[in-house]
Amino acid sequence: MRGITRTVGVALAIVFAAACGGASTPAASQPAASAKASAPKFELSTYQYAIQTKGKLRIGSQEDNPPFSVKNPATGKWEGFDADFGRELAKAIFGTQDDIDKFIEWVPVVSATRIPSLTDNKADVIIKTFTITEERKTQIDFSDVYFVTGQRILVKKSNDTIKEAADLGAKTVCAQRGSTSEQNITKANPAAKVLLLDSYPACLLALQQGQADAVSTDETILFGLVKVDPNTKIVGKPFSDEPYGIGVKKNQNGDRQGFVPFVNTWLAGMIQDGTWGKLYEKHITPVSGDKKTSPKG
Amino acid sequence: MPGAIAFQFPDLFFGGLWVTIQISALGLAGALVIGTAVALLRISPAAPLRWLGAAYVEFFRNTPLVVQLFFLFLGLPLVGLRFSSDTFESIFRAAATGMALYHGAYVAEVVRGGLLGVDKGQIEAARSLGLSYAQMLRYVQLPQTFRAVVPPVGNIAIALVKNTSLASTIGVTELLFGAEIVESRTFRAEESFATATLLYLLLTIPLGLAVNYLERRLLVAR
C-alpha cells in the first residue's frame, strides 16, 4: 500500500512538474537547472550518462540479506552495507541530493536471479554479496573487489560435534540455492548433505527446528544470523575466499560504454576518502566486532 | 536443442522427474482418499460432522499451498512432530502430505457435487429397500458419483502435477528444482527451463489423455 501511494505520489509529482514546465516561467525553471549543475558531467556515449539522463539508477539487491541488505518491513526503506553502498554509487552519478532514494529504483533479487536480472536488463547494477567467479565472468562483468569474506559454518550453541568442514560428513547443511556457498560445501566435504532453501533466514529456521545440522555461507552473512539468534555460534576456519564485486551487464554494442571503469574509479575513491570504512563500521562492526578501512583489511 | 541438456545432467532432470512423479502419485492418492472422506462428512446427516468437513475445505482451500508446505516442514517440529528424523525424507513426506491435504479440499468439493447429483429418489428407494446408510453409499450413491466426477478430478490431478513444483521452496529436488540447479551451474537458462517444460508436458498430456479415456470407458458402461 505504501509502495502504491508512493508510486502515485511520484507519478503526480512528475505530471505536475511537466505541467509547470509546459507553462514555464524563467523563475520556475531556475531551481531545476541548478540541481542539474551539482551532478557530475559525463561523456555522452557512456552508460553513466544514460542513467543520469534517465534519472534512475536500478540497483538489484536482496530484501532479506542482513547485514548487507534488508528492506525494513516497517518503513519500506533499504538498509545495510550493500544498500548504502548503492546509495553512494547513485550519488556519484546524480550528485549530492536531499533524498538520494528518489534517484534509485530498488530491484529485489535472490542469488539465482542476479545474473538474469542483469542480462535481461532489469537492473543496472547488482550489489548483493555477489562473489566474483570465473564462471560468472563469462556471463556478466564485475567491478573490482569491494568486500572480501570467507565461508564458515553456523551451528547451534549446544553443538559440540561440528567444529570444521571435515565434521560435516553425513550432516545436513543448509545453504541458499544458486549460491557459491552451495558448491563450496560440496567441495569442502563431498559427504555433506546439502539442503537448499531460498534465503538464509529460512536456513536459520531450519537450523532452529532441527531440520538442518548447520548453515554454511559467507562469514559476514553468518554474523547477521548470530545477531538474530544468539543461541547459535560460528565455528571453523574459513574454507573459501569470497571476493564480492558489483555485477554489471557486459558491454554489448556500446550499451554499457565506460561503466565498469567508472564504477572502479568511484570504488577506489570510496576506499580512499574513508567512506568505505565508515560504512563498514556502521553495518559490519556491530556484528563482527572488528574494524576495517578497505576490503583488504 | 532443448532436451539435450537433460542427458548431460540426467540426475537432476530425470531424477527430478522421478521425484515429481512420486510426489504427484502419493499426493493424488492421498487427495482422493481425503477428498472422498471429507465430502462424505459434508453430506452427513450429523451437523457437527458437516461443520468439520466445511472447516477442512475452507482452511485448505483458502490458504496458499506454499504456506502449508512451510508449515509442514518447519512448523510441525515446533510442536514436536516430524515426518522423519532424516531431513530429506522429511521434506519429501511433507511435500507429498501437503499435496494431498491441499488438493484433497478441491477433490472434496467436486465429490460433494457428485454426491448431491445422485437423484434423491434412488437414495430413498435404497433406504426403503432396507439398505443401511453405509450400504446405500457403497452400492448406490458413491459408484454413480465416482463416474460423474472423473473429468473434474482429472483437472485437479493435472493441477496437482504442476503444483508439485512448489515443493522446491522447501528444498525438495523435484523437476523444477533440478532445472534451477542446472541453470545456476551452466547459465543455460532457456535450455534448462524449456527442458523442464517438456518433461512436465510429458507427464500432464498423457494424464489428460488417460482421464479422457477413463471418461469414455465409464460412459459406455453406463
Image (cartoon, coloured by chain):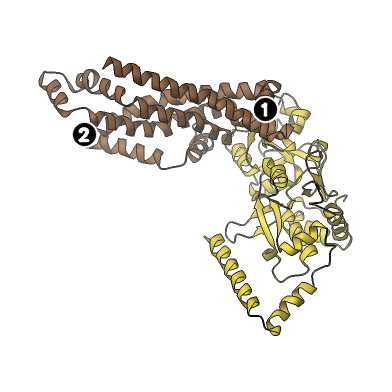
Chain colours: A yellow, B brown
Marks 2/1 in contact by CB < 8 Å: the verdict is: no
* Residue B25 percent coordinates (x, y): 47, 22
* Residue B48 located left or right of residue A280: left
Q: Is residue B85 visible?
A: no
Chain label for disc 1:
A
Disc 2 from disc 1: Cα separation: 50 Å
> Which mark is nearer the camera, 2 or 1?
2
What element does badge 2 sit on? loop
Residue A253 appears at what percent x and percent y? 81, 48
The front one of B31 and A264 is A264
Left or right of residue A212: residue B26: left
Q: Considering the image in quadrants, where does the N terminus of chain B appear? A: top right
Callout 2 amino acid: Ala
Residue A161 or A292: which is nearer the viewer?
A: A292
Which chain contains the residue that carries disc 2?
B
Q: Within 10 Å of the Cα at label 1, are there few (<14), some (14-19), or many (20+) other Cα atoms? A: some
Nearer to the camera, A253 or A86: A253
Which of the numbered marks, if any, corresponds to residue A171? 1
- Say what amino acid the circle numbered 1 marks: Lys
Residue B92 drawn above or below residue A25: above
Q: SS for tag 1? A: loop
Name the residue beneath numbered marker 2. B46
Q: Note whether B85 is above or below B71 in the view shown.
A: above
- The answer to which image quadrant residue A76 occupies is bottom right
